Image: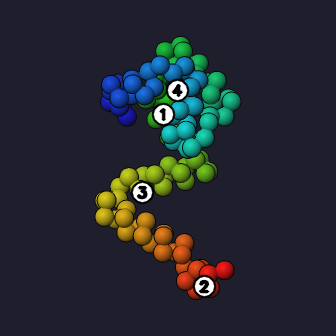
Amino acid sequence: MASFGASAEATTLYGSLTDTAKVNALYQQSFGRDADFAGLMYYAGQLSAGTMTAASIAQNIFDGASGNDATILANKLVVQRLTPLQLIQRLKLLHTLALLPLLLLGPC
C-alpha cells in the first residue's frame, strides 16, 4: 500500500486533492461512501499535520472496518484473488441466477 501511495499514479489521481477530499476518496474507494464526519475531521487533521500519510490512513481504515464496511472489504479481497476465468464463471452464474425467475415463471 505504501508503494502505491508514493507512485506517480497516486500523485496523478490524488495529488491535487484537499486533505478532506483525499480522505473521502479513500472511503469511496474502500466502502463506496464518504467518511463519517468524525473520521473525516480526524484523518484530514492527521494529513494536514503530517502525522499520517494517505497510505497509513488507508491501512488504519482497513484495520478498523466493521459491520457492512468489513463485509465490503472482504468481498473485494475475494474478487481480487479470483483468476479471470473464475471471475467470468461467477459472473455467468450470477447472470443465470438473476434470470432464473424468468425461466421458471415465463415473461410477464
Of tags 3 and 4, which is closer to the observer?
A: 4
Q: Secondary structure at mark 3?
A: helix
Sequence-earlier tag: 2 or 1? 1
**Residue 97 image point, x, y percent:** 52, 75
Sequence-earlier tag: 4 or 1? 4
Label for residue 58? Answer: 1
Q: Is there a contact, CB below 8 Å, between mark 3 and mark 2?
A: no
**What's the residue type where badge 4 is placed?**
Lys
Which residue lies under the disc numbered 4?
22
- Report how far apart the C-alphas of labels 3 and 4 lie in the structure: 25 Å
- Report how far apart the C-alphas of labels 2 and 4 lie in the structure: 48 Å
On the question of residue 45 being in view, the answer is: yes
Which residue lies under the disc numbered 2?
106
Sequence-earlier tag: 3 or 2? 3
Residue extending farthest to the front is 108
- Report how far apart the C-alphas of labels 4 and 1 lie in the structure: 10 Å
How would you rate the neighbour count of disc 4 (Cα within 10 Å): few for under 14, some for 14-19, many for 20 or more?
many
**Residue 55 image point, x, y percent:** 43, 29
- Report how far apart the C-alphas of labels 2 and 1 lie in the structure: 47 Å
**What's the residue type where badge 3 is placed?**
Val
- Judge whether 62 appears above or below 105 on screen: above
